[in-house]
Amino acid sequence: MKIIKIFPLEHRKDLHLGISFIYDDKMRNHLVSLPGVKWSNTKKVFYFPYSEDAKSILLKHLRGTGWYIDFSRVDEDEFKRRNEEKNPEQEHLKILKEFDSYLRGKRYSESTVRTYYSFLYKFLMFHKAPLEDLKNRDIEIFMEKVIAKKNYAISTHRQCVSAFKQFVELYGFAAVHPEKIPRPKKSRTLPRVLSQKEVINLLIATRNLKHRMVLAVIYSSGLRIGELLKLKLEDIDIDRKQIFISQAKGRKDRYVGMAESFIPILLNYLQTYRPARLLVEGQDGEAYSASAVRFFLKESCKKAGIEKRITPHTLRHSYATHMLEHGVGLRHIQELLGHAKPETTMIYTHVTQQDLLQIRSPLDTAVSNILKSGKEEENLRLSRK
């Protein structure tokens, strides 16, 4: 019998319900579709914020999956005692549900809904004063004491500001001016990329045919991980060497090219695995999980001797960088990547910088000039070998 164990979990000084089970793609995808469910890298378990109706919410979500739900370790009275001061009031729970419904009504993506919901949940746990008296300074204090103090990434901080703007828009707090909520500037970080030799070494080191096909199509067509996992067999046009990307980021459709050298891998994969609906399928024909792709990519990098921190998105960055280095125009790369703004694509010009990288170091020039003059001395052998 498949069992899901629910147990008390204290994480980041908050009370939660921990959720553990023998890994299963189908259950993992179903579980994370519930807003509020998150994965803890430190605890290595999924968890759900504790509240008076958390148990019933989980039961309702997991009922009918064929799994036995074990709540034996959850002592409701003990939880209520420990959580007396931490648990949001019923009014707060009502607000969370209304906020969730509001975001879905605006057709935000599932990921955005879950993220914004979690920010509001944290704020309601932190803010003890009546919400009708909410001011800009209350939000700023939350940012200072929770988001900045816990050293969340700048991108996460910016998302939090966006979440508050939606919250204020929904409830119209008179004393809050959303345009004055400070938003930190975007970090200008350059993407890591692999060399073309490293890409080939990575594919060679990936012995599993399915895994190799996944990495090859991400790199050869510059796909986002989410785009790959949603690809249907009908989206693959081998004759035209095209892949149709349906309703990607920003709800945009686009076509991307398919590499000639990828087609033999694809045909071999299709004949061997015979997927029924999706290009990449997990158990019972369900969608493959992003975490599984990240896991085998990490293993393949070890086998290939690649020590850089690589993610599936690194392959997309590498695709764009190599295209630019081979003379493909930025406008075409923007279309292929599905970027809404050319500024997003421009970052790859900073990665390549071919003209700058070809400038010779003055150290090399100095050593070369002296060696050419025939005055080679022991001191010029900088390696001492």
Image: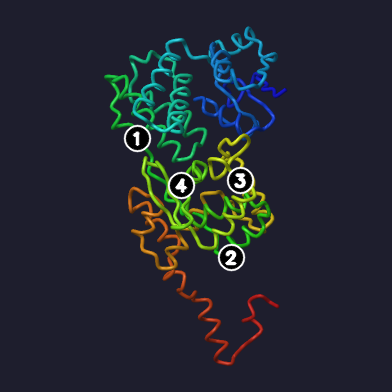
- Going from N to C along the chain, the mark reached first, 2 or 4, is 2
Side (left or right) of 341 relative to 310: left
Mark 3 secondary-structure assignment: loop
Instruction: Name which residue type carries label 4.
Output: Asp
- Going from N to C along the chain, the mark reached first, 3 or 2, is 2
Question: Disc 3 designates what residue?
Answer: 274
Q: Position of residue 264 (x, y in %)?
A: 58, 59
Confirm or deny contact between disc 3 and disc 1 (CB under 8 A). Answer: no
Q: Residue at 64% across / 29% down in the picture?
A: 45
**Circle 2 crowding by C-alpha within 10 Å: few under 14, some 14–19, many from 20:** few
The Cα atoms of the two marked residues, 3 and 2, are separated by 31 Å
Instruction: Name which residue type carries label 1.
Output: Pro
Confirm or deny contact between disc 2 and disc 4 (CB under 8 A). Answer: no
Q: In the image, which is nearer the foreground, mark 3 or mark 1?
A: 3
- Going from N to C along the chain, the mark reached first, 1 or 4, is 1
Side (left or right) of 44 relative to 194: right
Query: Which residue is nearer to you in this view: 266 or 127?
Result: 266
Question: Disc 1 designates what residue?
Answer: 182
Instruction: Name which residue type carries label 3.
Output: Arg
Instruction: Name which residue type carries label 2.
Output: Lys
Question: Disc 4 designates what residue?
Answer: 235
Q: Position of residue 355 (x, y in %)?
A: 41, 71
**Circle 3 crowding by C-alpha within 10 Å: few under 14, some 14–19, many from 20:** few
Mark 2 secondary-structure assignment: helix
Q: How many marks?
A: 4
Q: Residue furthest right?
A: 1
Q: Is residue 186 above or below residue 284?
A: below
Name the image quarter holding residue 274: top right
Q: Position of residue 67 (x, y in %)?
A: 65, 22
Quadrant, the N terminus: top right
Q: Residue furthest top?
A: 77
The Cα atoms of the two marked residues, 3 and 1, are separated by 52 Å
